[in-house]
Image (spheres, rainbow, N blue to C red):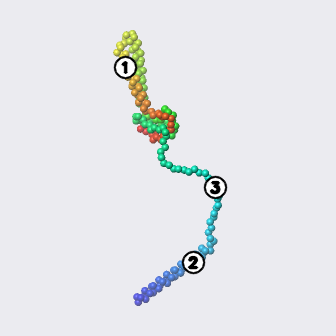
């Protein structure tokens, strides 16, 4: 009994597989027949006459380009940038201001020293007139002369400090790229 059930199952599987295979064969055959009935595909070709055109070969190189005259400029003293009159890439003439740092405190000190110097000069004129009439001592005159020289020296020193707060172009040329902007330290 066992053999009979196995044969029955095996024959059922063979019949079922053959039926599905036949069905698929007919489907594929009809699809191939339908595809054969279509006209063959075609390509469109366009003909154009080729013409010559002049060209210049390009060579790509890597490297660094530097101007024959260049200088990296830096301020001698630190401070806040108050003026950048030119943009990067502008052409500047020799002596033009490139960058100015905050110097109002030094300008105020110079103005105070100028006022003191004017006062000492007035006092010197008075003392010299009084000295001619023998109403002032030589000591007063010497003191005012020494104070006048001291104030002149202080003004000269302040002028040197103020000149270091402004950077000027050392020669005529094009400005490079700089990263500073007004207000930077």
In this picture, is 30 found above or below 151?
A: below
The spot of residue 152 in percent (x, y) is 40, 23
Question: Which sits earlier in the primary sequence, circle 2 or circle 3?
Answer: 2
C-alpha gap between disc 1 and disc 3: 92 Å
Q: Which of 123 and 161 is in front in this view?
A: 161
Residue 91 shows which numbered tag?
A: none
Rendered residue at 42%/35% (across/down): 75
**Element type where label 3 sits in the image:** loop
C-alpha gap between disc 2 and disc 3: 52 Å
Question: Which sits earlier in the primary sequence, circle 1 or circle 3?
Answer: 3
| Residue holding disc 1 | 146
Pair 1/3: label in front: 3
Farthest residue to the bottom: give it.
Answer: 1
**Element type where label 1 sits in the image:** helix
Residue 29 shows which numbered tag?
A: 2
Question: Which sits earlier in the primary sequence, circle 1 or circle 2?
Answer: 2
Q: Dividing the picture into quarters, in which one does residue 33 lie?
A: bottom right
| Residue holding disc 3 | 51
In this picture, is 1 found above or below 179?
A: below
Q: Dividing the picture into quarters, in which one does residue 44 lie?
A: bottom right
Instruction: Name the image quarter holding the C terminus.
Output: top left
| Dot 3 crowding, Cα within 10 Å, few <14, some 14–19, many 20+ | few
């Amino acid at each position: 009994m066992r053999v009979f059930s196995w044969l029955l199952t095996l024959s059922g599987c063979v019949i079922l597989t053959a039926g599905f295979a036949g069905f698929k064969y007919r489907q594929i055959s009809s699809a191939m027949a339908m595809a054969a009935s279509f006209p063959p595909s075609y390509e469109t070709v366009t003909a154009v006459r080729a013409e010559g055109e002049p060209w210049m070969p390009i060579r790509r190189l890597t490297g660094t380009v530097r101007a024959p005259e260049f200088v990296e400029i830096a301020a001698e003293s630190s401070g806040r940038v108050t003026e950048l009159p030119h943009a990067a890439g502008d052409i500047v003439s020799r002596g033009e201001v490139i960058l100015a740092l905050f110097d109002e405190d030094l300008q105020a000190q110079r103005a105070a020293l100028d006022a003191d110097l004017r006062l000492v000069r007035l006092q010197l004129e008075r003392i010299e007139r009084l000295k001619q009439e023998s109403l002032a001592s030589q000591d007063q005159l010497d003191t005012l002369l020494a104070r006048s020289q001291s104030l002149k020296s202080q003004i000269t020193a302040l002028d040197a400090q103020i000149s270091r707060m402004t950077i000027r172009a050392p020669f005529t040329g094009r400005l490079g790229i700089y990263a500073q902007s007004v207000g930077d330290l």
